[in-house]
Image (spheres, rainbow, N blue to C red):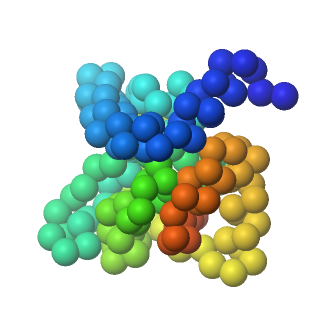
């Protein structure tokens, strides 16, 4: 059973109002705090684990930094991270997903460590299993999927050697 504060945050984060406001507020706050703490703190990670994804832009080729919630899997030293392209339940895919599809070699800042990763878009049974795990991890993803026509993209990030 989730603590009452967590259930409240999950309920709020499932609303359309949150979907309109959060994409403008949360990433800006996360970037600022992350920069000020030299990569050690993400405000949104107080509720969900988070990373700063750095990936080249699909069209520009320029580095793009995006704070994202993630679902770490396995041992952090050798494990993987699941990224969910929910876009807070808004209609279009988030830009970072197109960037990863165009340039799967990226980097994440995870708990103050810069980690080189390779992204893989999940499909089929692998996606189905990951989606079920994501819903257990953060139930509001179900509300996000219900109000959009697109299938939310899921990516597995795997640590790669430098």
Left or right relative to 66: residue 153: right
Q: Where is residue 44 in the image (x, y as percent from the top left)?
A: 47, 31
Picture quadrant where residue 137 is located: top right
- Outermost residue toward the right in this view: 1
User: Image quadrant for the C terminus?
Assistant: bottom left
Picture quadrant where residue 8 is located: top right
Give the number of callouts: 0
* Front residue (pair 149, 118): 149
The correct choice, above or below, for 130 with respect to 9 in the image is below
Residue drawn at x 48%, y 59% as measured from the top left = 85
The correct choice, above or below, for 115 with respect to 93 in the image is above
Picture quadrant where residue 140 is located: top right
Q: Where is residue 142 in the image (x, y as percent from the top left)?
A: 66, 53
Q: Position of residue 48 (x, y in %)?
A: 57, 35
The correct choice, above or below, for 143 with respect to 50 in the image is below
Residue drawn at x 28%, y 49% as measured from the top left = 65
Residue drawn at x 37%, y 43% as measured from the top left = 20
Regarding residue 115, the answer to whether it shows in the image is no
Q: Where is residue 159 in the image (x, y as percent from the top left)?
A: 53, 59
User: Image quadrant for the N terminus?
Assistant: top right
Residue drawn at x 40%, y 75% as measured from the top left = 101
Left or right relative to 23: residue 154: right
Regarding residue 125, the answer to whether it shows in the image is yes
């Amino acid at each position: 059973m989730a603590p009452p504060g967590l259930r409240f945050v999950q309920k709020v984060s499932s609303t359309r109002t949150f979907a309109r406001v959060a994409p403008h507020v949360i990433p800006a706050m996360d970037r600022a705090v992350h920069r000020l703490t030299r990569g050690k703190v993400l405000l949104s990670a107080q509720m969900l684990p988070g990373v700063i994804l750095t990936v080249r832009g699909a069209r520009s080729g320029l580095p793009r930094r995006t704070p994202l919630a993630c679902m770490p899997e396995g041992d952090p030293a050798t494990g993987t991270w699941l990224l969910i392209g929910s876009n807070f339940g808004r209609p279009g895919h988030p830009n970072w997903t197109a960037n990863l599809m165009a340039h799967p070699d990226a980097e994440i800042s995870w708990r103050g460590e810069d980690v080189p990763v390779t992204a893989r878009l999940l499909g089929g049974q692998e996606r189905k299993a990951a989606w079920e795990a994501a819903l257990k991890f953060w139930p509001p993803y179900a509300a996000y999927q219900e109000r959009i026509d697109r299938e939310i993209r899921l990516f597995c990030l795997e640590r790669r050697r430098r």
